[in-house]
C-alpha cells in the first residue's frame, strides 16, 4: 500500500527495527509507529470492541484514535503521535472502549 | 519547575511559533508545548529534518520549505520548547496539565495561547471506517514525516486547496495510478463568484494563480478526474477495494488499493470547548468557531486563540494571528508601550487582512455537499461506537433535542476519540431533524482528559508534588 520515496531508507538490516506482535518491523528514523506499521503492510491494526469491525489509522494526526496500540506495556498509545524507537514492543490492543 | 510563566503556547505550527517567538523576543517568559516530536504544525511538519533532503523538498514545494525560517526564529528566541508533550487538561486560570513519556506535569501561566490548529472535516460516507480509507491530510503526513507514498491505485475523493495540492505532490512523488473524484458541487460556482471581486485585493491574486497552476499541472499530466462526484460509497469487507459514485448522470465503480477523503478543514475545538470558551456557528465555514475579540482573546480573560483553531485562515494568516495574540499579551504584561503596541498591531493586522481576501471565495466554492454534512441513515457517524445516522435520528424523534442527550442515550461521542470525529455530524443531524439553528442545538460538552492518561501516569505527578 505504501512505498518509500527513497528506496531502501528502511530495512531490517539497519538498527531501526521494532517488534510488532513478535515480528520485526523496520522503520526510517523519524517515522511514527503508525507509519512504520502501515509501511510494513500491517492492516487492520485493531478491531472495535463494539462490533469487531476492522480498523486502521485514519487521520495520522491524533484526532481519530483508530491507531491505539500497546507500546512497551503501556495501553492506549496513539501510534501516529509516537516516534518509532529501536526495540519498541508493540502489541495490538483488545477492548478499551474508553480511555480510563 | 512549577513557577509562574507569562505565557504557555499550546501548538508549534505557524501560529504558535510566531506567537512564541514574538512573546519571548518581547521579554515574556514563554513555554511552547506540542505533542508532535518536532516543530512545524501541520503545514511545516518535519521541515527541519527534511531541509537537507533534496528529493522530498522537491516533492513538497517551496511553501513548505519556507517554514524552516520560522522554526529557526522560534529556536533562536528564549522560549522554552517541549515536544512530544500533550496538553490533556487546561483550566481557565492558566493551568496546563501535560503528559510526556508517561509522566504528568502541572504547569501554570498568566496567559494561554491555544494554537492547536485545525483537523480535517469528518467525511462520513458509507464504508469510511474500512482499513484502506484514510484522509488526504493523513497521506500527506506520511509523505512529510516518513517519506512514504501510496503505491497501487490511489483514489483521492474530495475538494479544496489541500486536495489539489496533495494530488500534485503525489505526482511529484511518483504516484503513477491516481484517480481524482472531485466532489465540489458545480452549483457552488455562481455564489462563490460573488466573492471574487474581493479576492483581487491583497494576496488574493497570488492564491488564485497557485490554484490555477495546480489544476493546470494535474490536467497536463493527464490525471483522470471525475467531476461533480456525489453519492460516494467505499466498498469492501475487510478493507476498501472499490469506490462507487455518481458523476453527472453516470453511476460508476472503480477498483482501488487506497482511498483518501478530504472536505476541507475545521478548527480543532477540543481544547477551547473544554475550557468553556464561547462558540458560535459560522455559516460560511459550516462549523462552530470560538468567539474572539479583535486581539483574538476568547470569552475567557487571558485565554487567546491563534491560527486555524480560531477559524480557517491558512498558514500565512495563522502566523499573523499569532503575532496579534502575542502583542496583546505583551501589552497586558506592560512589556511594550501603547505606541509600540499600536504600530505593531497595525502592521500585523494589515498583513493578516491581505491573506483573508481569498477566504470567502474558497469557503463558498468548496462548501461540502449536504450529504457529507448530514449523512444518510446507513452511514456510521460515530466511528468509535459504530453508531449510524439512523440511530441518532431515532432518538431525536423520540425527544432527544441536544448532542449531550444523544450522547447519554447512544454512547456516541464517548469512545476513545471523545467525539472529535462525530461531534460536527451529530450536531448537524439534530439541527436538521428539529429545525433548530446550530447555535440553539449546540455541541458536545467536552471534558478532560483530552488525551489518554493512565492511573500510573497520574500517580507520577503526585510523587513529584
Ligand atoms: C493534515 C493537515 C495538513 C495540512 N497541510 C497543509 C499544507 O500542506 N499546506 C497548507 O497551506 N495548509 C495545510 N494545512 C492547513 C493548516 O491548517 C495550515 O493552515 C496551518 O498549519 C495552520 O497553522 P496553525 O499554527 O493554526 O496550526 P497547526 O499547524 O495545525 O499546528 C497545531 C499544532 O498544535 C499541536 N497540538 C494540537 N493539540 C495539542 C495538544 N492537546 N497538546 C499539544 N499539542 C497539540 C499539534 O501537534 C500541531 O503541531 C493542513 C491541515 C491539516 C489538518
Ligand atoms: S491515526 Fe488518527 S489518532 Fe492516530
Image (spheres, coloured by chain):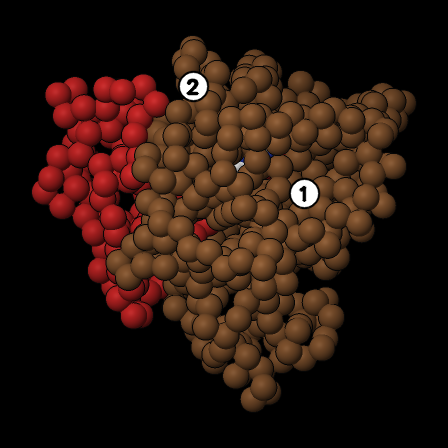
Place residue B141 in its image quadrant: top left
Q: Residue at x 63, y 49 (%)?
A: B184
Q: Residue B171 at x, y = what percent?
A: 46, 27
- Mark 1, residues whose alpha carbon is within 10 Å: few (<14), some, or many (≥20)? many
- Mark 2, residues whose alpha carbon is within 10 Å: few (<14), some, or many (≥20)? many
Q: Chain of mark 2?
A: B
Left or right side of B227 for B457: left
The lab-note entry on whether marks 2 and 1 share a chain reads yes
Identify the residue position indicated by label 1 in the image: B312
Identify the residue position indicated by label 2 in the image: B56
Most extreme residue toward the bottom, as rendered?
Answer: B398
Decide: is B174 above or below B401: above
Left or right side of B241 for B213: right
Left or right side of A84 for B177: right
Decide: is B390 above or below B397: above
Chain B hue?
brown
Q: Is residue A86 among the parts visible in the rendering?
A: no
Place residue B101 in its image quadrant: top left
Decide: is A13 above or below B123: above
Q: Which chain is red?
A: A
Q: Residue B374 at x, y = what percent?
A: 59, 67
Amino acid at each position: 500500500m505504501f512505498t518509500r520515496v527513497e528506496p531502501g531508507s528502511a530495512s531490517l538490516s539497519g538498527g531501526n527495527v521494532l517488534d510488532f506482535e513478535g515480528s520485526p518491523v523496520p522503520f526510517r528514523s523519524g517515522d511514527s509507529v503508525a507509519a512504520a506499521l502501515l509501511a510494513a503492510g500491517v492492516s487492520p491494526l485493531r478491531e472495535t470492541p463494539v462490533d469487531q469491525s476492522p480498523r486502521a489509522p485514519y487521520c495520522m494526526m491524533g484526532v481519530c484514535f483508530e491507531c491505539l496500540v500497546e507500546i512497551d506495556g503501556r495501553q492506549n498509545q496513539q501510534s501516529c503521535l509516537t516516534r518509532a524507537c529501536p526495540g519498541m514492543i508493540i502489541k495490538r490492543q483488545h477492548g478499551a472502549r474508553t480511555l480510563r | 519547575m512549577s513557577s509562574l510563566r507569562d505565557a504557555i503556547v499550546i501548538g508549534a505550527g505557524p501560529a504558535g511559533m510566531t506567537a512564541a517567538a514574538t512573546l519571548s523576543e518581547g521579554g515574556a517568559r514563554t513555554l511552547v508545548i506540542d505533542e508532535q516530536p518536532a516543530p512545524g504544525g501541520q503545514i511545516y511538519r518535519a521541515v527541519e529534518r527534511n531541509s537537507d533532503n533534496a528529493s522530498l523538498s522537491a516533492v513538497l514545494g517551496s511553501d513548505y520549505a519556507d517554514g524552516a525560517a520560522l522554526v529557526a526564529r522560534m529556536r533562536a528566541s528564549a522560549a522554552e520548547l517541549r515536544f512530544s508533550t500533550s496538553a490533556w487538561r487546561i483550566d481557565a486560570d492558566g493551568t496546563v496539565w501535560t503528559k510526556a513519556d508517561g509522566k504528568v506535569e502541572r504547569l501554570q501561566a498568566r496567559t494561554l495561547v491555544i494554537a492547536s490548529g485545525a483537523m480535517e472535516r469528518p467525511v462520513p460516507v458509507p464504508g469510511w471506517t474500512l482499513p484502506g480509507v484514510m484522509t488526504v491530510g493523513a497521506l500527506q503526513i506520511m509523505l512529510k514525516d516518513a517519506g512514504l507514498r501510496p503505491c497501487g491505485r490511489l483514489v483521492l475523493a474530495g475538494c479544496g486547496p489541500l486536495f489539489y495540492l496533495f494530488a500534485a505532490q503525489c505526482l511529484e512523488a511518483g504516484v503513477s495510478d491516481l484517480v481524482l473524484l472531485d466532489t465540489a458541487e458545480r452549483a457552488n460556482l455562481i455564489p462563490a463568484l460573488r466573492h471574487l471581486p474581493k479576492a483581487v485585493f491583497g494576496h488574493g491574486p497570488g492564491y488564485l494563480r497557485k490554484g490555477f497552476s495546480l489544476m493546470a499541472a494535474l490536467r497536463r499530466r493527464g490525471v483522470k478526474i471525475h467531476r461533480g462526484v456525489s453519492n460516494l460509497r467505499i466498498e469492501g469487507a475487510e478493507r476498501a477495494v472499490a469506490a462507487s459514485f455518481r458523476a453527472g448522470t453516470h453511476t460508476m465503480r472503480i477498483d482501488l488499493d487506497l482511498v483518501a477523503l478530504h472536505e476541507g478543514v475545521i478548527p480543532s475545538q477540543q481544547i477551547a470547548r473544554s475550557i468553556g470558551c464561547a462558540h458560535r456557528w459560522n455559516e460560511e465555514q459550516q462549523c462552530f468557531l470560538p468567539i474572539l475579540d479583535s486581539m483574538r482573546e476568547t470569552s475567557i480573560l487571558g485565554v487567546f486563540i491563534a491560527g486555524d483553531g480560531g477559524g480557517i485562515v491558512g498558514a500565512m494568516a495563522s502566523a499573523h494571528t499569532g503575532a496579534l495574540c502575542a502583542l496583546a499579551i505583551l501589552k497586558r504584561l506592560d512589556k511594550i508601550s501603547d505606541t509600540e503596541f499600536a504600530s505593531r498591531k497595525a502592521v500585523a493586522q494589515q498583513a493578516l487582512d491581505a491573506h483573508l481576501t481569498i477566504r470567502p471565495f474558497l469557503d463558498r466554492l468548496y462548501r461540502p455537499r449536504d450529504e457529507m454534512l448530514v449523512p444518510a441513515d446507513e452511514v456510521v457517524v460515530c466511528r468509535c461506537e459504530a453508531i449510524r445516522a439512523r440511530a441518532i435520528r431515532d432518538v431525536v424523534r423520540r425527544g432527544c433535542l441536544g448532542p449531550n442527550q444523544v450522547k447519554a442515550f447512544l454512547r456516541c461521542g464517548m469512545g476513545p476519540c471523545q467525539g472529535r470525529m462525530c461531534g460536527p455530524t451529530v450536531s448537524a443531524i439534530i439541527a436538521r431533524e428539529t429545525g433548530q439553528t446550530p447555535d440553539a442545538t449546540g455541541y458536545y460538552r467536552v471534558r478532560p482528559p483530552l488525551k489518554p492518561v493512565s492511573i500510573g501516569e497520574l500517580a507520577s505527578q503526585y510523587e513529584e508534588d
